[in-house]
């Protein structure tokens, strides 16, 4: 090889290396070039406290949609975003209207009758909480067979076939809470967050409807879940009405009666048929279980009253300087449970933690981004969802009617119910291991000397119980994080006890109130981390995705492909 030829080859090699480094810097390694500012200081914390204190004050009446307190909350968010100089997030408007329908069902003459003629009287709102579905506002049930279907699950993967070899068409099915994997503590079920759907009330109802059942009744046993949600809370919420999105279409549900039965009356019902409840739980969680006719019948007269009303998602935007149609989304639900007029004394569910913390967070994050000297390259949408406590209704509506194309949206970061346990060494990712967003969180936390840990309570199904899941089901990578439990002052064991005490004593109770003694140091750590994640995403060119085997990956791939095709056609 001549000297000149060697020099030419070396030059080509060096050029190739430079090109490769340029490509890496502009794609996969782009985040390394982004310097994220620190935004947390005493002024930031003071503004956060002021928002939290205001939103969870008695004046806001528990922030229930469709009430004066709910309207005040929306106005507070809109005025706050306006004062910061954020744009309206919905084509010139700060709101996205969400139409809702509230249903209340009353009943009389509810009885179960055994083959020997013995009967059991069942009282509405004391023993049973029921909802009437379908077009008609009345339902008369006379001498309908009761079929015990165990957990009411079907899964080839776990060999659950609870409806095999039984005809339930036009009959009433009796269902146990949760699923067999929980009872057996089967790690093959519990370790995959996607399997939580088998324990959902909605999944059980859909399965019963697919088999032609006229009604489905779930026995509410608090021991078949680690969720600290009790019958008294369930009854109080049912008395305020069941809510759903309203689209003007006629309800075509074939499953007319959907109900929950108190455990005590549930045991009596099964005893009327000659069965022991605990024995049936064991039988239903044993491989090979088959549904069977209890040999008793069900009767009752049900009437429904409905009210149509509206509420709003609140949206505000910081427009991106280079790619404004690509959007990073911060979300939190602004609603809570409102007031219970039947309660004596304090009857306002202020919701300081749930979700005053999240609502104040999106306001503080908006201030932090707006205070930066330059706008982000991508747009950032700050969104307060309505009606999360009614079944994630506001987020479902946005997911079905997005203002910004989800295929071009980058990711969503949902903030729901942070804790007041103080500074920690860790942060929690609910649904960890699902998407690329975990890596962004790990890098951001490391800067603060913190680590990311997996969900300590997978059985609670937190990832599937908050607004992030609505957008995830449409394919958008969606993150749900909590500030940690490994207290820097007291340690991890103390943090676990703190979490348990809060859930037991304050979750969805009137005691979830603001006080100046609440420690927001851990929330400040959290907000720096989620600011870092959003700032990095908003100033990069990367599109995070779900992991290859994740349930939402195919949906995301399809939406991204569609968005790229639309861009090409333009």
Image (tube, rainbow, N blue to C red):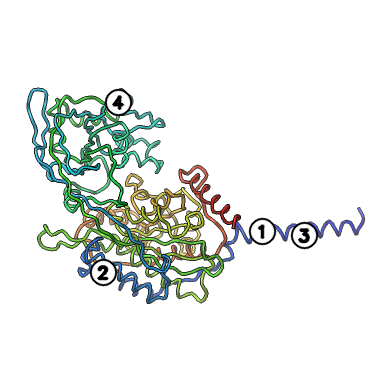
Residue placed under numbered mark 3 in the picture: 14
| Mark drawn on residue 72 | 2
Q: For this rendering, which residue is in front, 25 or 406? A: 406
Looking at the picture, how far across and down is residue 65, in whole percent? 26, 60
Q: CA gap, disc 2 to disc 3?
A: 63 Å
Residue 221, by quadrant, is top left
**Residue at 11% across / 29% down in the picture?**
113
Q: Earlier in the sequence, mark 4 or mark 3?
A: 3
Dot 2 or dot 3: first in sequence order is 3
| Viewer-nearest of discs 1 and 2 | 2
How dense is the environment of label 3, judged by Cα within 10 Å: few (below 14), some, or many (20 and up)? few
Please tell me whether mark 2 or mark 3 is closer to you in this view: 2
Q: Is residue 114 above or below residue 101?
A: above
Between residue 42 and residue 544, name the one nearer to us: 544
Closer to the camera, 99 or 258? 99
Please tell me whether mark 1 sits on a helix, a strand or a loop. helix
Which residue is depicted at the point 32% across and 53% down?
392
Which residue is at a point 40% across and 30% down the rendered structure image? 156
Q: CA distance from mark 1 to mark 2?
A: 50 Å
Q: Which residue is mark 4?
A: 289
Q: Disc 3 and disc 1: Cα gap in Å?
A: 14 Å
Task: Describe the element under mark 2 as helix, strand or loop.
Answer: helix
Q: Residues within 10 Å of mark 1 (few under 14, many from 20)?
A: few
Q: Which residue is mark 1?
A: 23
Q: Give the structural element (helix, strand or loop) at label 4.
A: loop
Determine which quarter of the picture holds residue 67: bottom left
Question: Percent position (x, y) of residue 258?
Answer: 23, 40
For discs 4 and 3, the disc positioned in front in the rendered view: 4
């Amino acid at each position: 090889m001549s000297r000149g030829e060697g020099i030419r080859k070396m030059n080509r090699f060096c050029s190739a290396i430079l090109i490769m480094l340029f490509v890496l810097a502009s794609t996969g390694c782009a985040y390394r070039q982004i310097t994220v500012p620190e935004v947390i200081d005493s002024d930031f914390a003071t503004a956060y406290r002021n928002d939290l204190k205001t939103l969870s004050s008695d004046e806001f009446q528990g922030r229930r949609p469709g009430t004066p307190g709910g309207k005040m909350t929306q106005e507070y968010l809109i005025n706050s975003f306006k004062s910061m100089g954020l744009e309206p997030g919905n084509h010139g408007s700060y709101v996205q209207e969400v139409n809702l329908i509230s249903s209340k069902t009353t009943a009389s003459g509810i009885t179960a009758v055994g083959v020997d003629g013995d009967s059991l009287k069942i009282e509405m709102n004391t023993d049973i909480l029921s909802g009437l579905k379908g077009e008609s506002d009345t339902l008369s049930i006379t001498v309908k067979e009761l079929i015990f279907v165990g957990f009411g699950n079907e899964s080839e993967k776990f060999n659950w076939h609870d409806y095999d070899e039984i005809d339930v068409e036009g009959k009433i099915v009796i269902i146990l809470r949760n699923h067999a994997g929980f009872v057996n503590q089967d790690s093959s079920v519990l370790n995959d967050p996607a399997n939580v759907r088998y324990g959902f009330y909605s999944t059980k109802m859909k399965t019963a409807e697919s088999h032609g059942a006229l009604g489905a009744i779930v026995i509410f046993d608090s021991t078949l879940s680690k969720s600290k949600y009790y019958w008294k809370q369930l009854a109080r919420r049912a008395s305020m009405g069941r809510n759903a999105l309203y689209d003007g279409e006629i309800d075509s549900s074939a499953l007319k009666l959907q109900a929950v039965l108190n455990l005590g009356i549930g045991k009596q019902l099964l005893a009327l048929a000659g069965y022991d409840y605990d024995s049936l739980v064991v039988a239903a969680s044993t491989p090979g279980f088959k549904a069977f006719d209890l040999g008793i019948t069900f009767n009752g007269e049900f009437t429904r009253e409905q009210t149509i009303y509206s509420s709003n998602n609140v949206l505000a935007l910081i427009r991106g300087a280079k790619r404004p149609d690509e959007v990073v989304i911060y979300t939190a639900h602004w609603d809570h449970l409102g007031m219970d007029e039947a309660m004596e004394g304090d009857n306002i569910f202020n919701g300081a933690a749930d979700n005053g913390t999240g609502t104040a967070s999106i306001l503080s994050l908006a201030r932090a981004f707006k205070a930066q000297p330059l706008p982000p390259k991508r747009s950032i949408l700050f969104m307060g969802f309505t009606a999360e406590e009614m079944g994630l209704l506001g987020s479902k509506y946005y997911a079905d009617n997005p203002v910004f194309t989800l295929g071009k949206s980058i990711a969503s970061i949902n903030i729901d119910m942070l804790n007041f346990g103080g500074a920690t060494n860790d942060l929690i990712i609910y649904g960890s291991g699902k998407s690329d967003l975990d890596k962004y969180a790990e890098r951001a936390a490391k800067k603060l000397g913190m680590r990311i840990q997996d969900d300590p309570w997978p059985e609670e199904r937190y990832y599937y119980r908050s607004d992030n899941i609505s957008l995830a089901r449409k394919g958008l990578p969606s993150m749900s994080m909590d500030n940690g439990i490994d207290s820097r002052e007291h340690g991890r064991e103390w943090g676990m006890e703190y979490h348990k005490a809060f859930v037991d004593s304050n979750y969805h109770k009137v005691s979830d109130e603001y006080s100046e003694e609440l420690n927001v140091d851990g929330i400040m750590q959290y907000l720096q981390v989620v600011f870092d994640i959003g700032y990095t995403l908003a100033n990069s060119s990367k599109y995070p995705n779900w992991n290859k085997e994740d349930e939402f990956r195919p949906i995301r791939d399809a939406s991204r492909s569609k968005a790229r095709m639309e861009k090409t056609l333009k």
